[in-house]
Image (tube, rainbow, N blue to C red):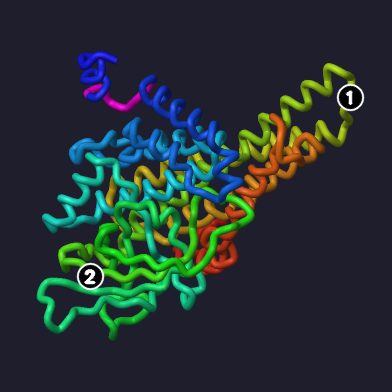
Amino acid sequence: MCAAIVALEESEPLRGERLTRSVDAVAHTAADHARDVDAGARLPVEAIAALREQNLLAAVAPRDLGGPGLSVRELAVVARRIARDCGSTAMVWAMHQGQLACLCRHRGDAPVLLDLVRTAVAEQWLIASATSEPASGGNIRRSTAALVVPAEAGGTVTLAKDATTVSYGAAADLLQVTARRNPEAAANDQVLVAVLREQATLDRKSTWSPLGMRGTSSPGFRLTATVPEEQVFGDPFADIAGATMVPLTHTLWAAVWLGLAGEAVSRAVKVSRRRAAGNRGGDAVRQALGEARWRLASLEALLSDMAGRTQTLLDEGAQPTAGQSVHANSLKVAASETALDIAYLSLRVCGMAGYSEEGPFSVARIIRDLSSAPIMINNSQLLDTTAQLMLMERQRNW
């Protein structure tokens, strides 16, 4: 490609046909390596390289920081498209976008964090999070780890964290780590710390050979680091999570699961057409296919509604109301349960062709990947939180 065309494409907004071409290029790369990624429980490094090449790692970054500034609806379309070819690639991308959004939106006035976000966007850094700990029971709003100010190291803080899972952490350029504000702080008095990969020591604590989403490479790590105080976000983590991390990640996770479910239905339709040509199939199979489609339509409508709500929340830059948090939690629970139901209905339609790990009609990996959805922030925990939020809301007709 000549230099003039390259310059034109770089200046052209990542929108419309250009966005479609870029996402398709990533999806095709992801598809080529998806089976090997799954079999080896390894990171989809080829697809991540393609995301970087297409400027899609910076997708959520606003244009004034050098990013494409995609809307929430556009981000959801990207997640859904990539997921159809590789759920792990789409989930890594979705989790990364949530972390990059936190850095872009909550960096405050600290010059160090502004430099980090500009470099992260320009160099297409991969950003991971370390929020979970064994004692928290999966509740990211509580930490055991705490920041410590060394007696003889002015201007720096240290932290040590036993992280239960750190998705794609070993490959990340930047890790965003939760910790208590200080050793005397309460478990929910948390801050978020930006830790460059070269500032961190990661000692792997566990293996990674799960049922599905194997390419997210999410073992546990013992993380230790010493960083400048300026790399501690000014906003409390509770505010960062409420205003940005939770609504955006729940929306993008749901888009990933919708993409997987949509691919399962597509394969079920193809099998049904082949059977119809041979006058095979029955009422039960057709009913399963019809049910899968209406469930898919309901999930599409739910995601569309939440994408709009999330965009409004991000645009306002305010903390969510109890009602808005109920919507975000409800989307996560509904999408994770419904997408898995859709995949199983598709399996019933596809039969042995779907049950096999091989072949064009297999939905085996899709089902395994979607099996992770209800336990990514466990649904039982979210339902309990949602019930408490509902009691806090002003009276309304449910």
Q: Would you identify the image quadrant in which residue 309 lies? A: top left
Quadrant, the C terminus: bottom right
Tell me where residue 64 appears, x and y as whole percent.
Answer: 18, 38
Tell me where residue 369 appears, x and y as whole percent.
Answer: 61, 48
Q: Residue at x 56, y 35 (%)?
A: 84
Res. 91 in view: yes
What secondary structure do most residues of the magenta stretch adopt?
Answer: loop
For label 1, count other residues whose C-alpha is less than 10 Å away and answer few (under 14), some (14-19) or many (20+): few
Residue designated by label 2: 226
Q: Is residue 384 above or below residue 256?
A: below
Q: Amino acid at mark 2?
A: Thr
Q: Nearer the viewer, residue 120 or 332?
A: 120
Q: Nearer the viewer, residue 116 or 35?
A: 35
Q: Which residues are magenta?
A: 11-16
Tell me where residue 316 appears, x and y as whole percent.
Answer: 28, 48
Residue designated by label 1: 280
Q: Amino acid at mark 1?
A: Arg
Q: Is residue 23 above or below residue 339?
A: above
In the picture provided, is 338 more to the left or to the right than 74? right
For label 2, count other residues whose C-alpha is less than 10 Å away and answer few (under 14), some (14-19) or many (20+): many
Q: Is residue 158 above or below residue 119?
A: below
Evaluate if marks 1 and 2 touch, with contact meaning CB atoms under 8 Å apart: no
Q: Residue at x 36, y 69 (%)?
A: 223
The question of residue 120 being in magenta is answered with: no
Tell me where residue 292 appears, x and y as whole percent.
Answer: 71, 37
